[in-house]
Image (spheres, rainbow, N blue to C red):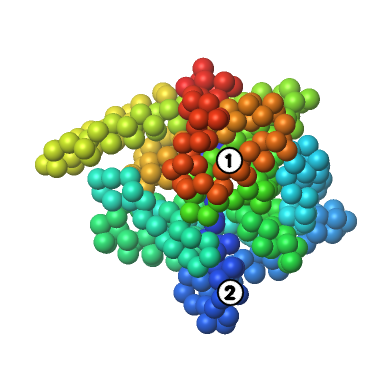
Amino acid sequence: MAPPASTLRLISARPLLIAVASLSLSGCSVVGHWGQAAGGHLGIIRAAKPVPVWLADPATPPDLAERLRMSQQMRDFASAQLALPDNNSYRRYADLGRPAVVWNIVAAPEFGFQLKTWCYPIMGCAGYQGWFDRDAAQRHADELKAEGWEVQVQPIPAYSTLGWSRWFGGDPLLNTFIRYPEGELAAMIFHELSHQRVYTSDDTGFNEAYASAVEMLGARQWLAAKPEALAAFEAGRARRARFLALAREGRDKLKAVYAGPAELRAEAKAAVMAELRERAPREAPGYEAWFQRANNASFAILSAYDDLVPAFMRLFEREGGDWVKFHAAVEKLKPLEREERRATLRGQGGSDVPDPQTRTAQ
């Protein structure tokens, strides 16, 4: 079974933004990772056409036309109701002819959860590296494995250039997510637009948790008058909550193992992983494949993108559900140092408790 949409989106393809930004610094000398990233992004820009062009084309399949019309309603809703940027992003569509827009490499040590980081001009450091070509990503992942890292190559359906692409038509809708269920499609658009609203350099977990809170709250608001679609969305998020609960438990057990005697770590780690794989079909149905492939890199990146979401949800409540005030409150946290920012968020957003809509599912 393919990973659910909300899981595939746990990592954004921020390195693509970095590569595009670097062109202004490096000119035509960009090679290697920079070159493939810039070339891949420009390929997407060339493939994208305005949604009205697709709708006017009789060759556009009816189901795709319906999704494109709905996407534009969601796009209008995002700016009018959620106070997200009103620009040309997600007003065009591109069919890339592949199942992912990019493949990200994540890596962690054999007995720890510290992600390997890659650092870039202007944009800072990130715990992943994006590649447009899956085979190229796998080759680089194999090199890291040979160095002793535990590595994952993860398919990513969408990314944000934080508004850098507005001069080229904006970030486009893509075939990699356009046919998601209605709630997940709305969540995807709201998530990526939120990166254009507030973004903090060198704090990936903060950025992604903020965007994840926006997508959850925004999708619920979009689906408020559609009970069947809302129920389907909540059921999917409840399944994800059960998955996250089991993954957190596994991560905590592994953390205890890694803090113990070095000579016992390998055997104890194998026992924890075997237990998780045995429990997954019962406690996290639909996510069995994730646990079969899981390693330290999997747990590390999952933690980076999930831990702060409840605090953002509480902050939204504290601001009375007012989107303008909520975004402004998040914006005020940007100048703080990383740890002060997180401590302040937890303090003003409330304790890190599960979202009330999914608490019983965990």
**Residue sitting nearer the eye, 356 or 102:** 356
Q: Position of residue 50 (x, y in %)?
A: 80, 59
Lateral position of residue 68 relative to residue 118, left or right: right
Lateral position of residue 355 relative to residue 246, left or right: right
Q: Residues within 10 Å of mark 2 (few under 14, many from 20)?
A: some
Amino acid at pointer 2: Leu
Q: Residues within 10 Å of mark 1 (few under 14, many from 20)?
A: many
**Residue sitting nearer the eye, 13 or 85:** 85
| Res 176 visible | no
Residue under numbered circle 1: 210
Q: Position of residue 355 (x, y in %)?
A: 55, 25
Lateral position of residue 56 relative to residue 360, left or right: right
Q: Does label 1 or label 2 sit earlier along the sequence? A: 2
Q: Position of residue 53 (x, y in %)?
A: 84, 59
Residue under numbered circle 2: 23
* The disc label shown at residue 304, or none: none
Gap between marks 1 and 2, in whole Å?
Answer: 28 Å
Lateral position of residue 332 relative to residue 178, left or right: left
Residue 49, compared with residue 261, is above or below; it is below
**Residue sitting nearer the eye, 189 or 314:** 314
Q: Position of residue 44 (x, y in %)?
A: 66, 64
